[in-house]
Image: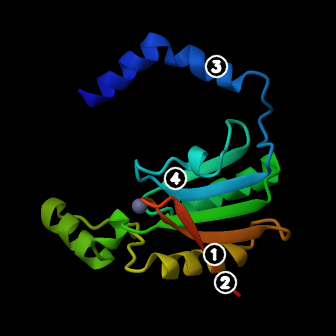
């Protein structure tokens, strides 16, 4: 029912609007930057950074955490489409801070009889999670040696980014 609402909006002209936004843009992001952030529906990453279509790659998942697939996308983003800088943005009040990895997997196992092969990357403290993920990216062997990674915790309600300094 809700997805149908979106299809209706597309049919009402969304496709034409999207095509107009993309017109004349090159495939490589013009600001040579990739942003990793949470899928939280309240985060307007374009508004937050005053961004336009065509300027960055935006990778979103539950938590905005560094998974194997984020590394896959960042590596392609850098090696094939020329990005260098990475901004990692996690946030206060994230759904990933409401359970532990073990709890989530126990619930899944109880309901389905199976355990997932992946981890949830649940965290209590977003700053600590950002620190861990920035460190992981800085040591990733596949990212470009000139990669600059900066990590932030976003206060969604205040629209304030707090940088997490990682030595
Ligand atoms: Zn979140």
**Disc ID at residue 166:** 2
At mark 3, the secondary structure is helix
Residue under numbered circle 3: 19
Farthest top residue in view: 12
Tell me the crowding category of disc 3: few under 14, some 14 to 19, or many 20 or more residues within 10 angstroms, Cα based: few
Tell me the crowding category of disc 1: few under 14, some 14 to 19, or many 20 or more residues within 10 angstroms, Cα based: many
Location of residue 122 with respect to 46 vertically, above or below? below
* Distance CA(mark 1)–CA(mark 4): 16 Å
**Disc ID at residue 60:** 4
Tell me the crowding category of disc 2: few under 14, some 14 to 19, or many 20 or more residues within 10 angstroms, Cα based: few
Q: Is residue 22 left or right of residue 46?
A: right
Q: Position of residue 47 (x, y in %)?
A: 58, 45
Q: Quadrant of the N terminus?
A: top left
Tell me the crowding category of disc 4: few under 14, some 14 to 19, or many 20 or more residues within 10 angstroms, Cα based: some
Q: Residue at x 79, y 46 (%)?
A: 81
Q: Position of residue 96 (x, y in %)?
A: 36, 67
Q: In the image, is the residue at mark 1 within 8 Å of ligand 1 by its beta carbon?
A: no
Residue under numbered circle 1: 134
State which quadrant residue 84 falls in.
bottom right
Asked if marks 1 and 3 touch (Cβ < 8 Å), the reply is: no
Q: Is residue 51 visible?
A: yes
């Amino acid at each position: 029912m809700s997805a149908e609402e979106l299809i209706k909006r597309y049919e009402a002209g969304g496709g034409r609007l999207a095509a107009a936004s993309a017109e004349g843009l090159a495939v490589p992001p013009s600001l040579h930057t990739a942003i990793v952030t949470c899928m939280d529906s309240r985060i307007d990453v374009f508004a937050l950074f005053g961004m336009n279509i065509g300027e960055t790659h935006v990778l979103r998942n539950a938590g905005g955490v560094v998974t194997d697939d984020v590394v896959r996308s960042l590596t392609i983003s850098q090696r094939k489409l020329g990005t260098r800088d990475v901004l990692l943005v996690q946030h206060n009040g994230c759904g990933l801070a409401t359970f532990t990895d073990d709890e989530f997997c126990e619930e899944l196992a109880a309901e389905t009889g199976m355990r997932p092969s992946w981890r949830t990357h649940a965290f209590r403290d977003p700053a600590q999670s950002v620190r861990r993920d920035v460190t992981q990216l800085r040591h990733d062997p596949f990212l470009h040696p000139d990669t600059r990674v900066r990590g932030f915790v976003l206060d969604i309600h205040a629209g304030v980014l707090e940088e997490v300094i990682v030595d």
